[in-house]
Amino acid sequence: MQVNQNNGFKGSFGIPPHMKAAMETAEKAKAENAAPTEAAPKAYADEGYALDGSEEVSENTTGEDSLVQKSVDKDPLEMLKENYDIEITGEDIQRIIFKGYTEKDVIVLPSILGSQPLIATFKTLTGAEYELADEKLAEEIRDIRMTNDGFAARRGVWLLAYGLKKIQGKLYYKQKFSDDAGKVFDKKATLESRKNALGDFSPVVLSRMMAIQSDLTIAINYLFSEAKGSFVKKP
């Protein structure tokens, strides 16, 4: 299955109508003959995937699709506390509302066999950062055939490039400037620098950091979703 190259990552996968119909008929027959299973729990689906488990590239890649749901058995806020010892505070909400983002220091990996704990500073993304990350992703995959898993993995890395700010209290990338004096900050070049620097991390560490950023985003979106009723002034 591949992304429609003519329309970026929106729209269908280019399956002919007659083939799609045959596939749907086969799947229906398979489902009717299969043993009954328990209903899936209410889920917060991962980015770019359908709730029923079938692969489907998200129609929206401008940042709002990070608000979609992902499978969880617990309250996302409880999971954030239990898995990473992260708590969302009133100050975090204030920053998100008035600055567009908040930052949290997180122990990515604890001390293992006497090693130094890995501590990273994560930030939530602004709408402009989602847009630029998706713009860079579109440029990268324009002429590449890839599966839905490949698309999701690459997008996750680009988003982490913005979401990961520091490692052990220090920048892990080189800031880029568009002038020789180093006064005009180049956002696109710096984002590429951040993304390229992620390649120096081992897969196990990179995967852990991507999971933390994803769970942090989901928990904050969940919190705002649950609180939206309180924004309505009651008579």
Image (cartoon, rainbow, N blue to C red):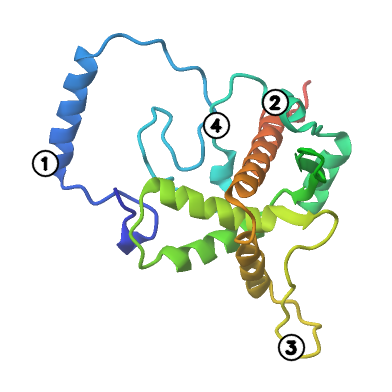
**Which residue position holds label 3?**
179
Q: Is residue 187 above or below residue 101?
A: below
Alpha carbon separation for disc pair 2 and 3: 45 Å
CA neighbours of label 3 inside 10 A, class few (<14), some (14 to 19), many (20+): few
Which amino acid, mark 1?
Answer: His
Can residue 126 be seen in the rendering of this structure? no
CA neighbours of label 2 inside 10 A, class few (<14), some (14 to 19), many (20+): some
Q: Is residue 147 left or right of residue 91?
A: left
Closer to the camera, 105 or 199?
199
Q: Earlier in the sequence, mark 2 or mark 3?
A: 2
Q: Earlier in the sequence, mark 4 or mark 2?
A: 4
Q: Nearer the viewer, mark 1 or mark 2?
A: 2
Residue 70's label in the rendered image is: 4
| Residue occupying image coordinates x 69% and y 33% | 219
Which amino acid, mark 2?
Answer: Met
Alpha carbon separation for disc pair 3 and 1: 56 Å
Q: Is residue 74 left or right of residue 62?
A: right
Residue 143: percent from left, percent from top:
35, 68
Q: Is residue 55 above or below residue 14?
A: above
Can residue 29 be seen in the rendering of this structure? yes
Q: Is residue 206 left or right of residue 166?
A: left
